[in-house]
């Protein structure tokens, strides 16, 4: 009994620890970015909105159900470097960002500017970000300026397009199939956070046998057998 009631406040924070007491709550549904289903098949222009006709919005509940987390911050109230550089998350002046960092153990950050004049080999990079892939860690992006689309697969394996912009801090769970593109404004300024040493390696689909994929499928996609 004593074990179970022990205070956990002084343990190392971790996103997988359920009984955190002081976690920053995710933002209310009304603040989440717009999301919609993309048409089936390949898209001609990855930077266009690619909505279905008529549009099929995707709810926050559906996004949460596939493991996405979201916090709205005020990116314009603080200064961040404008170019691609490592950035020490310990330098977070924004108290909300600092708390999310501590809640979730984010120990590394850098800043990336995806823009034709600021990112070498821009077109190739934009194409590469758009390959469907997973990672063996959570993908954490805090958008400081500009905008873009994160596409994630829903439970029916359809593409859900999420339109992210300044102030959006979104996390994609380890093992989820996803891709990214700038929108037609061709500019996004983002902070990439990480727990420990960053490994951005993408594993392109198909990678059903990858441990991270198996863990994701088991945790998020397979029906739980405990209900009945
Ligand atoms: C990614 O993982 O696709 C990126 O880092 C793209 C730029 S950040 C929005
Ligand atoms: Ni990725």
Image: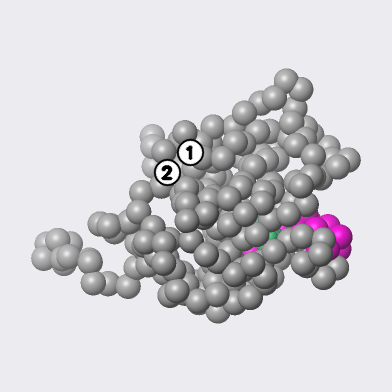
182 up-or-down from 32: above or below: below
Q: Residue at x 54, y 71 (%)?
A: 109
Q: Position of residue 2 (x, y in %)?
A: 11, 65
Choose between 186 and 45: the one closer to the eye.
Answer: 186
Q: Position of residue 4 (x, y in %)?
A: 17, 62
| Membership of 30 in magenta stretch | no
Tell me which image quadrant ligand 1 sits in.
bottom right
Here the colouring is: one colour
- Residue 27: mark: 2
Residue topped by disc 1: 31
**Residue extending furthest left?**
2
Label 1: which secondary element:
helix
Q: Quadrant of the C terminus?
A: top left
CB contact under 8 Å: marks 2 and 1: yes
Left or right of 217 in this view: 107: left
Label 2: which secondary element:
loop
Q: Badge 2: few (under 14), some or many (20 or more) residues near its Cα, within 10 Å?
A: some
Residue 8: quadrant of the picture: bottom left
Q: Which residues are magenta?
A: 122-135
Q: Residue at x 32, y 73 (%)?
A: 12
């Amino acid at each position: 009994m004593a074990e179970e009631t022990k205070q956990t406040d002084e343990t190392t924070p971790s996103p997988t620890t359920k009984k955190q007491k002081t976690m920053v709550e995710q933002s209310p549904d009304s603040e989440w970015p717009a999301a919609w289903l993309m048409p089936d098949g390949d898209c001609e222009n990855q930077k266009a909105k690619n909505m279905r006709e008529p549009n099929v919005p995707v709810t926050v509940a559906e996004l949460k159900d596939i493991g996405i987390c979201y916090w709205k911050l005020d990116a314009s109230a603080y200064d961040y470097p404008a170019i691609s550089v490592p950035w020490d998350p310990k330098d977070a002046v924004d108290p909300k960002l600092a708390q999310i960092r501590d809640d979730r153990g984010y120990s590394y950050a850098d800043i990336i500017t995806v823009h034709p004049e600021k990112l070498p080999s821009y077109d190739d990079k934009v194409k590469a970000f758009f390959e469907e892939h997973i990672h063996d860690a959570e993908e954490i992006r805090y958008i400081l300026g500009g905008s873009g689309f994160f596409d994630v697969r829903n439970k029916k394996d359809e593409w859900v397009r999420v339109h992210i912009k300044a102030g959006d801090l979104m996390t994609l769970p380890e093992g989820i199939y996803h891709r990214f593109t700038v929108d037609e404004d061709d500019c996004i300024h983002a902070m990439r956070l990480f727990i420990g040493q960053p490994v951005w390696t993408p594993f392109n689909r198909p990678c059903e046998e990858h441990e991270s994929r198996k863990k994701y499928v088991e945790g998020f996609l397979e029906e739980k057998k405990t209900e009945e």
